[in-house]
Amino acid sequence: MSRPADGRKPPRRPGWPGRPLEAPPARTLPVRPPDPHVDGAKPPDIPAELVPRHVALVMDGNGRWAKARGLPRTEGHKRGEYSLFDVIMGAIELGIPYLSAYAFSTENWRRSPDEVRFLMGFNRDVIRRRRDQLHEMGVRVLWAGRRPRLWRSVISELEDAERLTAGNSVLTLQFCVNYGGRAEIADAAAAMAADAVAGRLRPDKIDEKVLARYLDEPSLPDVDLFIRSSGEQRLSNFLIWQSAYAELVFLDTLFPDFDRRDLWRACEIYAARDRRYGGAVPNPVMALPDVSEST
């Protein structure tokens, strides 16, 4: 897939310079159902209209899990792979159509060179190792994030997975690799400015809908449910535009111990909440007695 000259990942919208418009390949393979949970757990009975369409997942706690066991941080990341794929299967079972996973942030470059090197190779190998399995389950893979600094082998695996799974529709899995919410918005603003200078965009026509079309994956709906494992309670610059009205659920489970049951628990919490999007229903007011009738 072609990229703009400055290395940003082009949004999926018609007319982005340099990106060919390709029809996704037609799927010919039968869809493989997700593996059952090892303990036989079944998804909760949540009404379809209360199941979140788009879940954002911050996979936090790998390092603390490893530290508590006297292991290097890398062992926590390795264990987290199995947690993520159990969550993916649980999302399919519950009927969640979109899942975004925070795999590597723009801030993660601040970690030790050894850990960054491990994470680069690990993300590449996970995508390569799991690509066919995801394809068999009907999962469409998308990549959101910046191209600069990423290993070329990581980019190659992400793009290969995107091409292979483009025709799938059971679940859309957005891998956010070298991603930051502020960086995404800044890149969108820069792209709009370039289009305005070139005469392709009138500045007076820019609004929220226009800006959203310049984000990495504008075809995805806004986040309904934002989940973070490990007990930390912050967004960490993840999908901050898309999560403006998301319900936030913070669970204490460290991510290597996380599985589909935790996802389902978060979805039950979500289903019990009243989403008003800034609106409100008038409070019932008790009628007061008519004083004039008693006199």
Image (cartoon, rainbow, N blue to C red):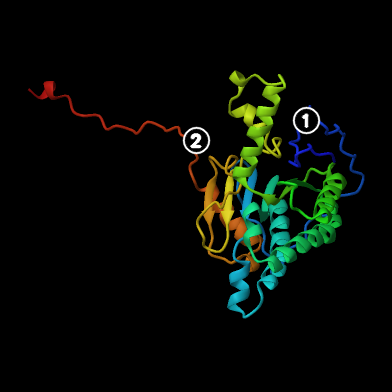
Q: Which mark is residue 62?
A: none
Where does the image place residue 170, in percent across and percent down from the top left?
77, 46
Inspect the image, locate mark 2, and give the three-letter code of the amino acid beneath it.
Tyr
Image side of residue 278 versus residue 184, left or right:
left
| Mark 2 element type | loop
Determine the residue positioned at 49% across, 46% down: 273
Q: CA distance from mark 2 to mark 1?
A: 32 Å
Residue 202 in sight: yes
Outermost bottom residue: 70
Q: Name the mark nearer the viewer: 2 or 1.
A: 1
Determine the residue positioned at 63% across, 63% down: 111
Q: Nearer the viewer, residue 247 or 75?
A: 75
Q: Nearer the viewer, residue 54 or 243?
A: 243
Q: Nearer the viewer, residue 46 or 216?
A: 216
| Mark 1 element type | loop
Where does the image place residue 141, in percent across and percent down from the top left?
78, 48
Local packing at callout 2 (Cα closer than 10 Å; few below 14, some 14-19, many 20+) is: few
Question: Considering the image in quadrants, where does the C terminus appear?
Answer: top left
Q: Which mark is residue 277?
A: 2
- Can you say whether 54 is above or below 207 in the image? below
Question: Considering the image in quadrants, where does the N terminus appear?
Answer: top right
- Can you say whether 181 is above or below 36 in the image? above
Where does the image place residue 107, in percent across and percent down from the top left?
62, 55
Determine the residue positioned at 53% across, 46% down: 247
- Can you say whether 237 is above or below 81 in the image? above
Where does the image place residue 183, in percent across and percent down from the top left?
63, 43
Local packing at callout 1 (Cα closer than 10 Å; few below 14, some 14-19, many 20+) is: some
Determine the residue positioned at 69% across, 51% down: 178
Inspect the image, locate mark 1, and give the three-letter code of the amino acid beneath it.
Trp
Outermost left residue: 295
Mark 1 lies on residue = 16
- Contact between marks 2 and 1 (CB within 8 A): the answer is no
